[in-house]
Image: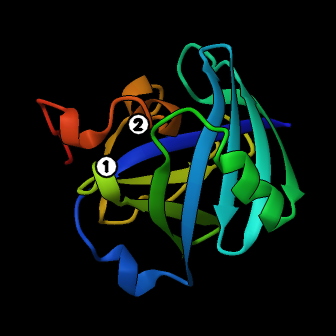
Amino acid sequence: MVEIERKFLVTSNAYKDEASRKIRITQGFLNTHKERTVRVRLKGETGFLTIKGISSEDGLKRFEWETEIIDEDAKSLLNLCESGVIDKIRYEVPVKNHIFEIDEFLGDNEGLVIAEVELSSENEAYEKPGWLGKEVTGNIKYYNSQLSKNPFCNWENKEII
């Protein structure tokens, strides 16, 4: 139940040609406390409820628990969420032994594209594709829970590469 992932900005649209899957995601947060977040997500037509704990100091690790829920329940729970629903298109790109998940944000976060790769250990090696930019692991402003409160459209410094 511990998630280990690295997060990066994306420098080009080349990942789209390499994607094996593309899906629309809508998500909101029932709770965005810094020690825990409770997320409701519709991934296509499938609902999920996720609880995430506080991140490690370097942002690489944190507790994550997720369960599938029926889509009608997810839609109902989205109506109870804090303001600032996240809307994005997720591309899944296989790169050697890993799957990079690239989120192309829509709405108030349009223009922001973030890639994540899940690892089995903090020091696990992975290949970096050419479209991978600056690492932003641990930078809280790139967390979805924070993007719901302070969207990309409000940023003065829109660092995207």
Query: What's under tag 1, amino acid-wise?
Result: Asn
Q: How is the image coloured?
A: rainbow
Badge 2 crowding class, 10 Å Cα cut-off, few under 14, some 14 to 19, many 20 or more, is many
Q: Residue drawn 86% across and 64% down?
A: 70
Q: Quadrant of the N terminus?
A: top right
Badge 1 crowding class, 10 Å Cα cut-off, few under 14, some 14 to 19, many 20 or more, is many
Between 136 and 146, the residue placed more toward the observer is 146
Q: Where does the image place residue 36, in percent across and percent down from the top left?
A: 70, 20
Q: Which mark is residue 124?
A: none
Q: Where does the image place residue 143, in percent across and percent down from the top left?
A: 48, 34
Q: Which residue is mark 1?
A: 109
Taking the image as shown, residue 66 lies to the left or right of residue 75, namely right
Between 34 and 138, the residue placed more toward the observer is 34
Q: Residue drawn 71% across and 74% down?
A: 45
Q: Residue drawn 37% across and 86% down?
A: 17
Between 150 and 93, the residue placed more toward the observer is 150
* Helix, strand or loop under label 2: helix
Q: Is residue 99 above or below residue 135?
A: below
Q: Which residue is mark 2?
A: 147
Taking the image as shown, residue 53 lies to the left or right of residue 144, namely right
* Helix, strand or loop under label 1: helix
State the CA–CA distance, disc 2 to disc 1. 7 Å
Query: What's under tag 2, amino acid-wise?
Result: Leu
Q: Residue drawn 47% across and 26% down?
A: 138
Q: Earlier in the sequence, mark 2 or mark 1?
A: 1
Q: Is residue 46 above or below residue 143?
A: below
Taking the image as shown, residue 4 lies to the left or right of residue 155, namely right
Q: Is residue 89 above or below residue 114?
A: below
Q: Are marks 2 and 1 in contact (CB under 8 Å)?
A: yes
Q: Where does the image place residue 160, in percent across and percent down from the top left?
A: 21, 47
Q: Where does the image place residue 35, in percent across and percent down from the top left?
A: 67, 13
Q: For residue 132, what is the image quadrant?
A: bottom left
